Image (spheres, rainbow, N blue to C red):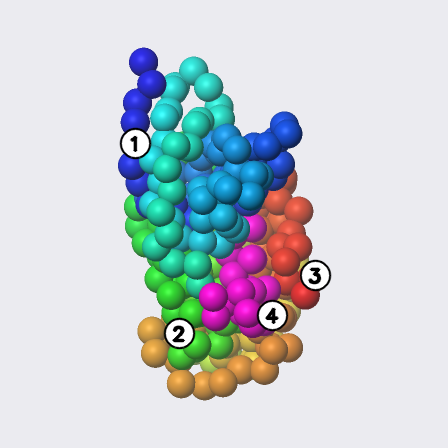
């Protein structure tokens, strides 16, 4: 029998279906990532069709059935549509990257309430504008990597376990991790991390970041993480949003 479930959701994507409907993919608080059909969503009178917009934080009611992949959405109410993010290209760029990563890296139906709350918090912080949106994206990615089992360890040599505190030269092997200068002499080096990039990651570890970083520094950190993800997750093709804007 179908089960009626009410939950909070972030709209990850939506697409046209048939003559008048849409299919949307949500990251939800109680069901994880899930897709649902919204009947009549493309008609001009559809209230639900307007509420279910990409990036929106909404409350939804679903008719779910374990035997089908796409569920049926019957109700949607707006919690936040993040107007300041949507009206700012830079914020939108980084918020879109969050959606993209959730869509590509979270398995369907795997509930992670902690991750859901983290997404809502990051979007609320982007909306407020108190921190650089690129820094907020990097914070989110490091949190996401930990949640999905690919935590990025960058402050302790993976070979000798020596703590790296602003070293002169840092090498990174995508399979083994970070290496101090001595340990990297006899190991394959995938990439050398600049002092500037290391300092950025050091700041990200702290909750209150006072420094203002250049966009190029943020981009370099994102490209490094992108390479790291591509190495560890074969089906991952990159973060398209950071290259399109």
| Residue indicated by mark 4 | 89
Whole-number angstrom distance, CA of label 4 to CA of label 1 = 35 Å
Q: Position of residue 117 (x, y in %)?
A: 32, 54
Q: Bin the neighbour count of mark 4 within 10 Å (Cα to Cα): few under 14, some 14-19, many 20 and up.
A: few
In this view, the residue in front, 48 or 149, is: 48
| Residue indicated by mark 2 | 128
Whole-number angstrom distance, CA of label 2 to CA of label 3 = 24 Å
Q: Residue at x 34, y 55 (%)?
A: 79
Is residue 104 something that shows in the picture?
Answer: no
Instruction: Say whether marks 3 and 1 touch (CB < 8 Å).
Output: no
| Residue indicated by mark 1 | 5
Disc number placed over residue 244 in the picture, else none: 3
Whole-number angstrom distance, CA of label 4 to CA of label 3 = 11 Å
In front of the other: label 4 or label 3?
4
Q: Position of residue 227 (x, y in %)?
A: 63, 56
Q: Bin the neighbour count of mark 1 within 10 Å (Cα to Cα): few under 14, some 14-19, many 20 and up.
A: few
Instruction: Say whether marks 4 and 1 touch (CB < 8 Å).
Output: no
- Give the farthest residue toward the right: 244
């Amino acid at each position: 029998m179908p089960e009626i479930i009410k939950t909070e959701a972030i709209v990850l994507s939506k697409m046209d279906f048939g003559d008048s409907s849409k299919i949307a993919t949500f990251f939800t608080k109680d069901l994880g990532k899930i897709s649902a059909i919204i009947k009549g969503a493309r008609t001009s009178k559809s209230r639900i069709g307007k509420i279910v917009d990409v990036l929106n934080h909404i409350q939804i009611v679903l008719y779910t059935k374990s035997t089908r992949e796409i569920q049926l959405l019957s109700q949607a109410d707006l919690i936040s549509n993040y107007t300041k993010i949507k009206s700012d290209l830079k914020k939108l760029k980084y918020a879109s990257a969050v959606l993209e990563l959730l869509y590509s890296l979270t398995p369907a139906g795997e509930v992670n309430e902690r991750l859901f709350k983290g997404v809502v918090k990051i979007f609320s912080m982007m909306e407020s504008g108190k921190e650089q949106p690129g820094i907020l994206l990097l914070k989110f990615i490091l949190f996401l990597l930990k949640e999905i089992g690919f935590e990025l360890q960058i402050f302790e040599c993976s070979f000798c376990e020596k703590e790296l505190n602003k070293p002169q030269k840092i090498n990174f092997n995508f399979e083994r991790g970070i290496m101090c200068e001595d340990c990297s002499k006899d190991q394959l080096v995938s990439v050398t991390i600049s002092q500037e990039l290391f300092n950025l990651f050091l700041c990200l570890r702290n909750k209150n970041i006072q420094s203002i970083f250049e966009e190029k520094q943020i981009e370099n950190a994102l490209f490094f993480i992108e390479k790291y993800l591509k190495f560890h997750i074969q089906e991952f093709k990159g973060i398209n949003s950071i290259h399109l804007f």
